[in-house]
Amino acid sequence: MTPTRPAGSTSGARHTWWFPDGDLPAPTEGDRFVSHEALIVLNPAREPAKLRLTLYWTDRPPTSFDHDLVVAGERVRCLRLDKLSDEGIDFTIPHRTQYAIRLDSSVPVFCQYGRLDTAQPNLTLMTAPAFG
């Protein structure tokens, strides 16, 4: 049996996505889960998506990264923003600092943002689609 390309429309995929509410939670000592933020990128195209991230701050010029951030064709990838070093990026987003994200892709992709905040006992897990 030969696999077929999944049915469905990719008309909502975009080259540019905006995430206006970055605010990396600080890790809480002794927690079972680690507070973090993540960008989830789905690439429905057959060719790889080359990504560039730009962070916007309240008190300084933007910071941009395009360090081999790639999502393979027809794959999904989660980029942990508290672990940019895992992506080869020598930069740390400061905890509890307001920022925004622009994601640019070489091919149209779908994006989502997620945050896990363990600062209070009930935890907070939030996900939101981006503005494209």
Image (tube, rainbow, N blue to C red):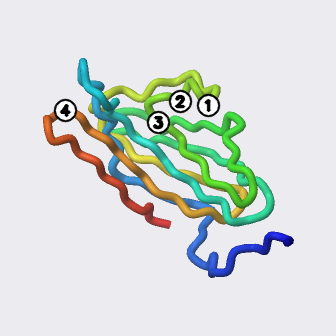
Residue that numbered label 2 is attached to:
84
Q: Residue furthest right?
A: 2
Mark 4–mark 1 Cα distance, whole angstroms, equals 26 Å
The secondary structure type at the circle numbered 2 is: helix
Q: Specify the quadrant of the image occupied by residue 6.
A: bottom right
State yes or no: discs 2 and 1 in contact (Cβ < 8 Å). yes
Q: Amino acid at mark 4?
A: Ala
Residue that numbered label 1 is attached to:
87
Residue 37 vs residue 4, the one in the foreground: 4
In the image, residue 12 lies at what x, y percent? 56, 75
Q: Residue furthest front?
A: 1
Q: Is residue 92 above or below residue 21?
A: above
The mark total stands at: 4
Q: Is residue 105 above or below residue 55?
A: below
In the image, residue 31 lies at what x, y percent? 26, 25
Q: Which mark is residue 81?
A: 3
